[in-house]
Every structure is written in C-alpha cells, then in structure tokens.
Image (tube, rainbow, N blue to C red):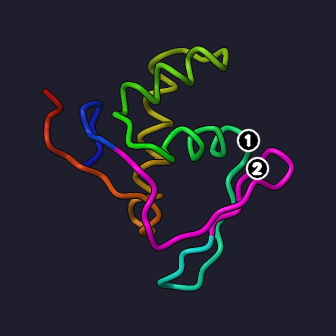
Amino acid sequence: MVTGHSRVVVAKEQISSDLAGEAVILNLKSGTYYGLNAVGASIWNLIQQSRTISEIQDALLAEYEVEPEQCDRELLVILQQLEEQGLIEVNHEAVG
C-alpha cells in the first residue's frame, strides 16, 4: 500500500509523451495505453525521478489550490492505480 513515506518512480518498461499538457503512457509489457489529465501529467512529470509521496504532495500543493487532505487522498488513489497497472515502481520502506 502506498503511504506518505513510500518512494515512487516511473517503471522502466513504459514510454510516455506530453500531449497538449496531458500525458499518454504506453505500458510496454501489456501494450496498453493510458492517458492522464493535466494534474495527472504533473504527477507523472514529478515522478520521472524518485520522490516520496510527501515530496509529490508538497509540489502539488504549491502548484494547485487544493486542501491538503483532498490532495493526499486523490494523490494516493492515482498512485495506487498507476502501481496496479505496472506504470510506477513503489518502494514501501520507510525513508530515514
């Protein structure tokens, strides 16, 4: 399960492209395409380098007008979905 201390990075077996501010991702293992809206694309861009959930949330709060609780909830949902589809790698160990 993804938590605030989890470290996230995009999976190696995918390719992605920016499409007018949104992101299109191809899972190379399954051959399935995925699309992300502008907020999802912002998250995708942030996790091109390994980051903790807390670092991602801080960046989103600085960029968008959203309550921290709502940001946290929705961020965890999208990261869970990306993980289930094999598009990201999550290290669940506590970051020290």
Residue 22 tag number: 2
Q: Is residue 2 left or right of residue 25?
A: left
Per the picture, the main secondary structure of the magenta-coloured stretch is strand
Q: Amino acid at mark 2?
A: Glu
The residue tagged 1 is 38
Q: Is residue 57 left or right of residue 18?
A: left
Q: Amino acid at mark 1?
A: Ala
Of the pair 12 and 27, the residue shown nearer to us: 12
Q: Which residues are magenta?
A: 8-25
Does the CB distance between marks 1 and 2 fall below 8 Å?
Answer: yes
The answer to which of marks 1 and 2 sits earlier in the sequence is 2
Residue 31's image quarter? Answer: bottom right
At horizontal 37% and vertical 33% (from top left) the residue drawn is 53
Q: Position of residue 33 (x, y in %)?
A: 65, 74
Q: Residue at x 39, y 65 (%)?
A: 84
With respect to residue 25, does 1 lie above or below? above
Q: Is residue 13 left or right of residue 65?
A: left
Residue at the spot 45% in from the left edge and 43% down from the top edge = 49
